[in-house]
Amino acid sequence: MLKDIFYACESLIILNTTQNVEEAQSFAKKIWERLEKFDRWYLLDIRLINTILFIFPVDVAVHIGERATKQLIPYNNLKEADILLINIEVNLAVLLIDEQKYPEALSYLEKVIPLCKKHQKYSQLAIAYARKGIILQKTGKMDEGSEHIEKAYSILNAIEDRKLIDDLGKELSHYLNKGCEGPLQLEILQQE
């Protein structure tokens, strides 16, 4: 497990400092190669997978993400498992948005929006609404997309999360205005 944490850190450091995706993937693959052999994963394993998910090619990331969500089933009575599910599926959605696979991305978001509400995870709810808005606008439903984006901003303004408001603006600019900023990645947030 400590090696996996080291590999995850190395992978992220390499990606952030050199943007060398292949080298970052070499460390991330070591984690996946170990975990794919096991029938059951611990929550920490699933957290690690969520952290490195975006380093893999989209088809591989979706496969790994689907496996991770199945691994959460034994933990279904734990709030943390639902929060991990939210974060994994919102992250998978943005990877699919990058590939213009809008129906698949939307299906992930439709599943997590009720969970965000159930657990009062307003930051994740706002991101899910914004990403749903992006998809709707990209598929020609401009008004409905704008409504979801407005919902996202309303939530973030209500909870006064200025940093996430700024980051969300960059993400929206990236997808809707062809800006240079990339998507947000959700990590597991501290539990109350």
Image: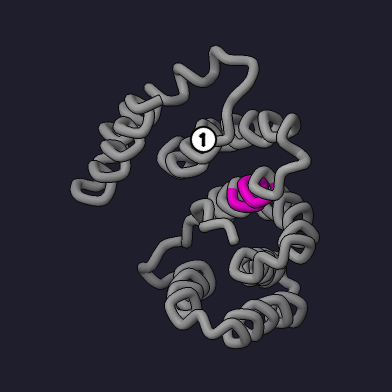
Residue type at mark 1: give it: Leu
* Magenta stretch in the rendered image: 82-87
Image quarter hosting the N terminus: top left
Whether 104 is drawn above or below 133: the answer is: above
Question: Picture coordinates of residue 105 (x, y %)?
Answer: 67, 52
Question: Picture coordinates of residue 147 (x, y %)?
Answer: 73, 81
Image quarter hosting the C terminus: bottom right
Q: Which residue corresponds to the image point at 58% horizontal and 15% vertical from the top-left?
A: 38
* Residue 138 visible in this rendered orientation of the protein: no
Q: Residue 179, located in which quarter of the rendered image?
A: bottom left
Q: Which residue corresponds to the image point at 35% horizontal and 27% vertical from the top-left?
A: 2
Q: Which residue corresponds to the image point at 73% horizontal and 61% vertical from the top-left?
A: 119
Element type where label 1 sits in the image? helix
Whether 100 is drawn above or below 125: the answer is: above
Q: Main secondary structure of the magenta part?
A: helix
Closer-to-camera residue (68/104): 68
Whether 115 is drawn above or below 11: the answer is: below
**Is 89 positioned to the left or the right of 55 in the image?**
right
Closer-to-camera residue (23/180): 23
Closer-to-camera residue (137/132): 132
* Residue 124 visible in this rendered orientation of the protein: yes
**Which residue is farthest top?**
37
Question: Picture coordinates of residue 37 (x, y %)?
Answer: 54, 12
Question: Picture coordinates of residue 135 (x, y %)?
Answer: 66, 64
* Residue 74 located within the stretch drawn in magenta: no
**Mark 1 highlights which residue?**
44
Q: Which residue corresponds to the image point at 58% horizontal and 80% vertical from the top-left?
A: 156
Whether 23 is drawn above or below 115: the answer is: above
Closer-to-camera residue (135/27): 27
